[in-house]
Amino acid sequence: MTFGDDFQRLSKYSRHTLKGRSLDWENKPPLYKKDPDAELFKLSEPDRKGGQPLYGILQQRRSVRNYSSAAAAEKNLSQILWATQGITSSTAHHQFRAAPSAGGLFPIETYCAINKVEGFKPGIYHYQVPYHALALVKEGAFGLDLAQAALGQKMLRDADFNLVWTAMIERSKWKYEQRAYRYIYLDAGHLAQNAALAAVSCGLGSCQIGAFFDEEANQVIGVDGEWEFVIYMSSFGKPA
Ligand SMILES: Cc1cc2nc3c(=O)[nH]c(=O)nc-3n(C[C@H](O)[C@H](O)[C@H](O)COP(=O)(O)O)c2cc1C
């Protein structure tokens, strides 16, 4: 099978083939996924100025796979979510976020699978970027299901919470067509790295997770796997 090689070749930009084209503004997909019926939990205001100095955090960050049994503080969850996609500036027509995104199209959605965070029931939550809030998708302990979906990696069961990133590919395809598949992974990498660095600043450890059974992960989070599909995860907790 060579579909990976084919994809890389076929999604190249070249001076001979790249043509300008107009964008269909009337059918631009919405930037935010909303569920007006979901129960919404406002997160505490994140620290936008402090934290530990960046270079020290870079020096300290390591993948952590064993976590203590203590629950995470809500303020740490809030800080880490803000570091992924929190809104950091706004103009009349645009809202900019903590991490960059190709074309400002923000195709990645962040879900939080909470195992133990103070003030939250275990469950799957969706990060509502404009409100810095979590919307409850489904209540319950899904840590084990997520661990099984991730090839049995127990850290997802033992973590205080796991962030699961999905791509809503049409948001990016609207502008970039098939090349969008390159960009969603780059976008997700930025989010995960921001989250990993924020975690260190909060005294937590994290591990990035690319190995999972795709359809099982989609099912745990509750996305259809076509319009929206899981592409990356990270687990978070106090190092054991
Ligand atoms: C794209 C990506 C996928 C990864 N997937 C996994 C994974 O599924 N399980 C795991 O234990 N570590 C995973 N890791 C973590 C790497 O193993 C780890 O970053 C690497 O060994 C370097 O160690 P460090 O993170 O401590 O610097 C992943 C890292 C990246 C960037």
Image: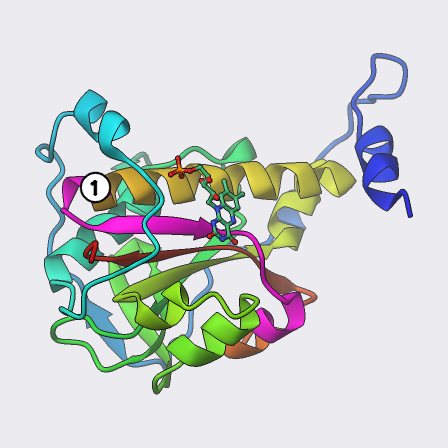
Query: Residue 214 is drawn in which quadrant?
Result: bottom right
Q: Is residue 207 magenta?
A: yes
Q: Is residue 94 visible?
A: no
Query: Residue 94 is drawn in which quadrant?
Result: top left
Q: Position of residue 90 (x, y in %)?
A: 29, 37
Which quadrant of the figure contains the C terminus? bottom left
Q: Position of residue 18 (x, y in %)?
A: 82, 21
24 vs 142, nearest the viewer = 142
Above/below status of 56 relative to 64 = above
Name, please, the residue furthest toward the bottom.
Answer: 140
Left or right relative to 66: residue 189: right
Q: Position of residue 142 (x, y in %)?
A: 40, 80
Q: Which residues are magenta?
A: 200-218
Left or right relative to 11: residue 225: left
183 vs 219, nearest the viewer = 219
Report which residue position mark 1 lands on: 200
As shown in the figure, which amino acid type bears the numbered disc 1?
Val
Above/below status of 43 relative to 58 = below
Q: Residue at x 55, y 36 (%)?
A: 186
Label 1 CB, ligand 1: below 8 Å? no
Q: Residue at x 38, y 36 (%)?
A: 99
58 vs 74, nearest the viewer = 58
Above/below status of 18 relative to 85 = above
Count every numbered label the image shows and give the total. Answer: 1
69 vs 160, nearest the viewer = 69
Q: Residue at x 87, y 45 (%)?
A: 3
Q: Residue at x 63, y 44 (%)?
A: 172
Left or right relative to 10: residue 97: left
